[in-house]
Image (cartoon, rainbow, N blue to C red):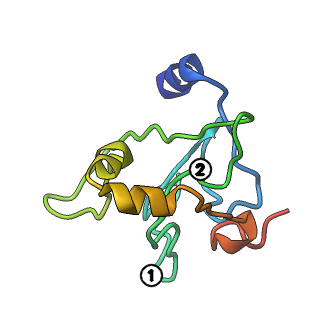
């Protein structure tokens, strides 16, 4: 599939574990995780499926230099309005911070665990 080939040209392709809550890889292409309201066979996943329904940053739990993760998105259908996917340029945001705030944050760090991420919490 062209999307997998494109992604592979940018670096290692990461295939999510079978225990990943999404449990909806593209048929015959496990590197593509379908993020949709419908299963690959076209049936509705149902109102109780809330996959990824929280603010998150893809890949924040991977430790460089092993991987620096990014997502390659492809939409086959989008709503006429809304959609709730947002993108932020953190470099631009950082450039707006005051010098005192930058100095205060210099020693800060974030520790994230895959066990704290709902879609992975039950994973192996």
Q: Which of marks 2 and 1 is nearer the N terminus?
A: 1
Residue extending furthest toward the left = 80
Question: Is label 2 in contact with label 1 (beta carbons under 8 Å)?
Answer: no
The answer to whether 43 appears left or right of 24 in the picture is: left
Which mark is nearer the camera, 2 or 1?
2
Write the residue at 44% across / 58% down: 36
Q: Name the residue under label 1.
A: 47
Write the residue at 68% across / 73% down: 116
Residue 34 versus residue 47 in the image, above or below? above
Q: How crowded is mark 2: few (under 14 residues within 10 Å), some or many (20 or more)?
A: few
Give coordinates of residue 124: x percent, y percent.
85, 62
Q: In which quarter of the image is residue 110?
A: bottom right
Q: How crowded is mark 1: few (under 14 residues within 10 Å), some or many (20 or more)?
A: few
The answer to whether 112 appears left or right of 81 in the picture is: right
For numbered disc 2, what is the local secondary structure? loop
Give coordinates of residue 77: x percent, y percent.
28, 49
In the image, which disc is placed on residue 59? 2
For numbered disc 1, what is the local secondary structure? loop
Write the residue at 54% across / 21% down: 10
Write the residue at 76% across / 61% down: 19
The answer to whether 37 appears left or right of 79 in the picture is: right
Of 124 and 38, nearer the camera is 124
The residues bearing labels 2 and 1 have C-alpha atoms spaced at a distance of 26 Å
Residue extending furthest toward the bottom = 48
Residue extending furthest toward the right = 124
Of 14 and 87, nearer the camera is 87
């Amino acid at each position: 599939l062209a999307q997998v080939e494109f992604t592979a040209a940018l670096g290692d392709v990461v295939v999510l574990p079978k225990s990943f809550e999404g449990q909806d890889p593209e048929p015959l292409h496990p590197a593509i995780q379908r993020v949709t309201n419908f299963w690959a066979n076209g049936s509705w996943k149902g109102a109780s499926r809330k996959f990824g329904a929280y603010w998150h940053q893809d890949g924040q739990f991977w430790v460089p230099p092993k991987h620096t993760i990014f997502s390659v998105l492809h939409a086959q259908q989008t709503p006429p309005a809304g959609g709730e996917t947002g993108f932020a340029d953190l470099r631009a945001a950082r450039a707006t911070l005051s010098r005192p705030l930058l100095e205060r944050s210099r020693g800060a760090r974030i520790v994230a665990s895959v066990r704290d991420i709902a879609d992975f919490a039950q994973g192996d």
